[in-house]
């Protein structure tokens, strides 16, 4: 599982995303290929999104490296994880709820809704314990919010 990355991502850290996140992911992928790892789990980020373009670009690049590697892969794509020290977006939850009611903003509200830490951990455990038959398996926010049990996609298809 690849969890190395720049702490507290912000648009001002674009250079660090390339120097830390991308470099560490490349090294992890190379090591996994050499070691014959049977299943690689990567925590990416939900996209598209209206902000954090450099962060998303690096995450997409890593996803492409994983596809090219031939590794059996699960990619988790949360937008924001609510947990200790990272709770301020909880004040936005009512706005996400309202946005889900409007057809024009529903898809974005579902894709970019914050995920509680315990659900993210549950989805990561589910990903590790149940490697995909079709790779890469991509778990978007709805699947993560359900602990990795539903709404999984592989190559853009809903399973």
Image (cartoon, rainbow, N blue to C red):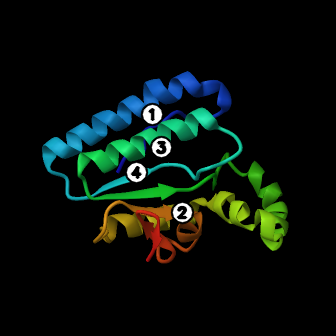
Q: CA distance from mark 3 to mark 2?
A: 14 Å
| Residue 42: numbered disc | 4
Disc 2 designates what residue?
140
**Which circle's residue, 1 or 4, is located before the other in the chain?**
1
Disc 3 designates what residue?
60
The percent position of residue 115, horizontal first and vertical second, equals 63, 61
Q: Work out whether residue 127 or residue 152 is closer to the camera in this orientation and state it.
A: 152
Tag 3 and tag 1, C-beta contact below 8 Å: no
The percent position of residue 81, horizontal first and vertical second, equals 61, 54
Nearer mark to the viewer, of 1 and 2: 2
- Residue beneath the point at 75% across and 67% down: 106
Q: CA distance from mark 3 to mark 4?
A: 11 Å
> Dot 3 lies on which element?
helix
Nearer mark to the viewer, of 3 and 2: 3
**Which circle's residue, 3 or 4, is located before the other in the chain?**
4
Nearer mark to the viewer, of 3 and 4: 3
The percent position of residue 109, horizontal first and vertical second, equals 73, 62
**Which circle's residue, 2 or 4, is located before the other in the chain?**
4
- Residue beneath the point at 40% across and 41% down: 62
Callout 2 crowding tier (Cα within 10 Å): few <14, some 14–19, many ≥20: many
| Residue 132 makes an appearance in the image | yes
The image quadrant that residue 28 belongs to is top left
Q: Work out whether residue 130 or residue 71 is closer to the camera in this orientation and state it.
A: 71
Disc 1 designates what residue?
21
Q: CA distance from mark 2 to mark 4?
A: 12 Å
Q: CA distance from mark 1 to mark 2?
A: 20 Å
Q: Work out whether residue 47 or residue 24 is closer to the camera in this orientation and state it.
A: 47
Image quarter hosting the C terminus: bottom left
């Amino acid at each position: 599982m690849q969890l190395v990355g720049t702490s507290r991502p912000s648009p001002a850290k674009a250079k660090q995303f390339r120097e830390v996140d991308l470099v560490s992911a490349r090294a992890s992928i190379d090591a996994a290929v050499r070691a014959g790892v049977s299943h690689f789990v990567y925590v990416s980020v939900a996209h598209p999104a209206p902000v954090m373009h450099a962060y998303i670009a690096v995450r997409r690049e890593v996803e492409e490296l994983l596809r090219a590697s031939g590794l059996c892969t699960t990619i988790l794509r949360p937008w924001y994880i609510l947990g200790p020290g990272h709770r301020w977006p909880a004040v936005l939850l009512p706005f996400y709820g309202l946005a889900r009611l409007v057809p024009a903003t529903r898809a974005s509200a579902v894709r970019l809704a914050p995920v509680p830490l315990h659900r993210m951990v549950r989805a990561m455990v589910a990903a590790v314990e149940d490697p995909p038959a079709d790779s890469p398996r991509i778990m978007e926010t709805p699947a993560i919010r359900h602990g990795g049990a539903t709404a999984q996609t592989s190559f853009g298809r809903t399973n």
